[in-house]
Image (spheres, rainbow, N blue to C red):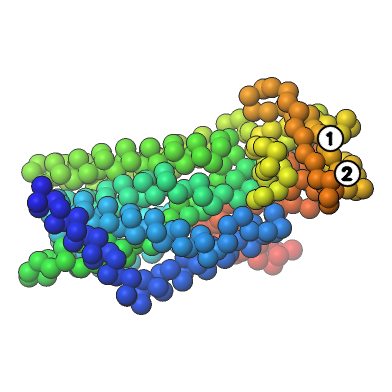
Amino acid sequence: MHYLLQIVYYSIYNVFNILKSPLLWVVIGVIYIQYRKYGKMEEGILGCYKVSPFLNVLLSTIYGLIGGILGSILLMYFGITIRAMDFYFILPLALFLSLIHPRFICFSYAGGIISIISLIFGWPEINISEIMFIIGVLHLVESFLILVDGKSSKIPVFMERRGEIVGGFSMNRFWPVPFTILINSGYLHPVTVFAILGYGDFVLSNFPEKKARITASMLSLFSLTLLILARLSREYFIFKYLAAIFSPVAHEIIIKIGRKMEEKDYIFTSVDEGLRVLDTLPKSIGEKIGLNPGDIILALNGCRVYSNRDIETLLFFRPKYIWMEVYDLNKRFVTKEYKDYQNGISHLGIVVVPKIPEQIFIVEESIAPVNKLIKNFKKRRCRNKN
């Protein structure tokens, strides 16, 4: 017990001590730029920030520090040691793989591939068990962060699926995770290193909160299985092969399952009668009266509504009191009311799924740099032929 308390104290001390490092603030700056980028998309759709980029960075940093402490405790408790040389092979391969697709920058792919090459050819000489253990711990920390913070930055988006516009949410979170690990360079010494963990997902057939829980559950199962294989590989050589193969294959299966889930029945589609709510703005009337994503507004002040323009027309003269008929997620017909006798009511502050696309952002999934080059090359060839 005393040994564990020492590890906990040492992990907390080292992780918080890293706040003095300029490199950490560079990492935080990179994360801020990412949140600014997604914030502009959010502002374009909603007209405002739900959460400012600064607050997003602050929350991400706090959760990242907590994740770093948990990761450090696990790595030090199990006595995981690495050689710096091991990552000289993994990092360049991870960067190369990211050119094929951004998700391949994850160490589960590069670490698994390098480990398989090492097992077959005997080069490079790396500590496969320890590398697999580190990958497992990092993904366990990531699953924790997705569970507690993955849904915090959800942006309503529209995507084209099966020839129609479908509403959904884009979830993007980044966490700076400093963690302490033992380096073997002739003698053992602790070093605090950085990792940027990220979570990016589109939600079309689920609600963001549920999708984050499902993803975190699958990722934690992946992590625990990999940790068990890594532990067994210390004693049984065959498990080195199993861990090396499991790391990239199981990670890819998780991603495929997640994507398959989003190809089922879409939740946020347009309806013939009324308007389906996709999201509400912070502190808006829609939020105050309890409109939820997926609710269908059937009528406003006794008049049927079929488009945003219908709502704008009914609110043009700023009525002091409104009531609306809503078909909610529990399949109940409810009436919601709101009054503002001082200022009147000019807007509801909601995002709806339109029947006919008007002025909306249609988001496409990211294309890898290599695929972009191939696509541009094909376009140029077609132009030259013409």
Residue at the bottom extreme? Answer: 22
Q: Dot 2 lies on which element?
A: loop
Residue 162's image quarter? Answer: top right
Vertical position of residue 97 compared to residue 283: above or below: below
Q: CA distance from mark 1 to mark 2?
A: 11 Å
| Mark 1 neighbour density, 10 Å: few (under 14) some (14–19) many (20 or more) | many
List the single residue furthest toward the front: 342
The residue indicated by pointer 2 is: 319
Where does the image place residue 111, in percent across and percent down from the top left?
A: 28, 55
Residue 244 versus residue 329 in the image, above or below: below
Q: Could you tell whether 321 is left or right of 248 in the image?
A: right
Question: As drawn, which residue projects farthest toward the right?
Answer: 317
Determine the residue positioned at 83% across, 38% down: 322
Give the farthest residue toward the top. 332
Amino acid, disc 1: Leu
Instruction: Please report whichever mark, 1 or 2, sits nearer to the chain's N-terminal start.
Output: 1
Amino acid carrying mark 2 in the image = Pro
Total labels: the figure holds 2
Image x and y of residue 4, in percent? 14, 51
Q: Closer to the observer: label 1 or label 2?
A: 2
Q: Would residue 94 be visible to someone looking at this image?
A: no
Q: Is residue 91 left or right of residue 52?
A: left
Residue 330 % position (x, y): 63, 24
Mark 2: few, some, or many residues within 10 Å (few <14, many ≥20)?
some
Residue at horizontal 32 percent and vertical 75 percent from the top: 21
Q: Which of the numbered marks, if any, corresponds to residue 119?
A: none
Of the pair 341 and 307, the residue shown nearer to us:
341
Label 1 sits on residue: 300
Residue 17 visible in the snapshot: yes
Question: Which x, y percent locates residue 47?
Answer: 71, 58
Quarter in which the C terminus is drawn: bottom right
